[in-house]
Amino acid sequence: MFQSRVVAALVRRKEGFSRVYNTLIQSNSSTVLRHEPVKSFSSQTAKKCLFGVYGYRSFSKVHQVPSLRNMSTVASVASSKEGLKLLVTAGPRAQKMVGIWLFGSAAWVFSMVVLGGVTRLTRSGLSMTDWKFTGQLPPLSDEEWLQEFEKYKQSPEYKRVNKGMSIEDFKFIYWMEYAHRMWGRALGIMFALPFSYFLRKGYISLRLGLRLSTLFALGAGQGLIGWWMVKSGLEEPASEYTQPRVSPYRLAAHLTSAFIIYCGLFWTGLSVVMPEPPVESVAWARGAVKVRRFALPVSVLVGITAISGAFVAGNDAGHAYNTFPKMGDTWVPDDIFDMKPLIRNFFENTSTVQLNHRLLATATLVSIGTLWWSTRKLEIHPAVRSLIGSTFGMAALQVTLGVSTLLSYVPVSLGTAHQAGALTLLTLIILLNHTVRRPSMSLLKSLPQAVKTA
């Protein structure tokens, strides 16, 4: 009876209660939670507020600074209330489903890049001498295997590198290339079917739909780029002393396209599940700005270094100068500018391509180390600090893998690990840039000046 009277009095004086309630929250709170002013009350709302006033002291004792995972959920809920344009507008469950699908697709592309590296390192990429957009069944009988083997025997690679190869050895390299192609086609189906489902359910906004359609088109074009690359390796080399291999330009285009698709999927997945960056105070937001200014050029350097690795692979430059830190007996080989015009040396000259990759890798490690050192005392979100440290550690590991691969004459295991390491480093850089991106104005206006801890 007493509670009902109190509730009725609160409802009659809702404006006065709003001011009292907001004053209590702002003055007594020991947390970093943000509260919007109470504008209207029903009797149920008043009961909740009454509980909030009487039970507030016990609530404030248990609150802690949220983690990155919690922050993404809080930001998502706050964003929808504050009018931020979300990529998925059908609620948290739809966000989770679309996010899982996008991260799964990105992981599939990651595996495609690794499988492509194994295919290249085992010299399997030129085993299939034709290509169909829809794919084809593998040889199922001895006669069909002999037909495919006869096709391969007409290629320059068989004549100059694998002459005398047995049918069993041919089957191995054929299955490697076949698996790589079919894995890519399976990715297309795995992407297209959920995409169609989410579109039909109305989960995907127009902006997200256009972005994903572009990525799907790039994925379809990747098969064409791959065949365009392989076709260059099926042509007779200009010199009889040159081993047949694919064009380094086309290999770089194929790998760069895969990186773009992966980065697009991963960034979009992050944007779906974490529409706002994890900032809990103006001080953290300012720290994120300082990190972002340095992280962006570092990201560009990481990308350029990864692409330069494609030219190392395309020119088989990893099989030359298998010493470190010197290249043979010198720091800089004498023939780095032998080709004319000069620009060709950076893409076709084995010595220049390897030297270029060494310098870029060293610059990448130094720049990421500088980023880590310069942000040690910045007031930033713990997740951002952890990401910077992880990125620095991954950069050091990647350089170690690269040097080990070179000194070991590029074994398949280390070469594959080095290629996977490049994509892992790129993943961490993308995550760092996404985490320190600019928050919405509505979020910035609601932030306290500093994080308060219990």
Image: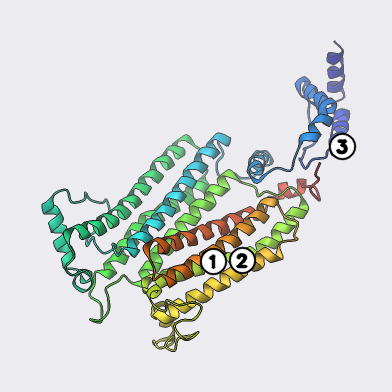
Lower sequence index among marks 2 and 3: 3
Residue 307 is at least partly visible in this image? no
Report x, y in % for residue 94.
Answer: 53, 36
212 shown above or below 325: above
- Number of other residues with Cα within 10 Å of mark 1, as a class: few under 14, some 14 to 19, many 20 or more: many
Q: Nearer the viewer, mark 2 or mark 3?
A: 2
> What numbered label is drawn on residue 47?
none
Amino acid bearing label 2: Ile
In the rendered image, the residue lying farthest to the top is 1
294 shown above or below 136: below
How far apart in space, not on screen, are marks 1 and 3 (Cα)? 47 Å
Report x, y in % for residue 127.
Answer: 24, 62
How far apart in space, not on screen, are marks 2 and 1 (Cα)? 9 Å
Q: Nearer the viewer, residue 61 or 91?
A: 61
- Number of other residues with Cα within 10 Å of mark 3, as a class: few under 14, some 14 to 19, many 20 or more: few
In the rendered image, the residue lying farthest to the front is 408
Question: In which image quadrant can residue 415 be found?
Answer: bottom left
Q: Secondary structure at mark 2?
A: helix
Where the C terminus falls, by quadrant?
top right
Lower sequence index among marks 1 and 3: 3
Q: Residue at x 84, y 35 (%)?
A: 25
The residue where tag 2 is placed is 368
Q: Residue at x 38, y 63 (%)?
A: 254
The residue where tag 1 is placed is 302
Report x, y in % for residue 298.
Answer: 59, 66
The residue where tag 3 is placed is 28
Q: Secondary structure at mark 3?
A: helix
Q: Nearer the viewer, residue 45 or 370?
A: 370
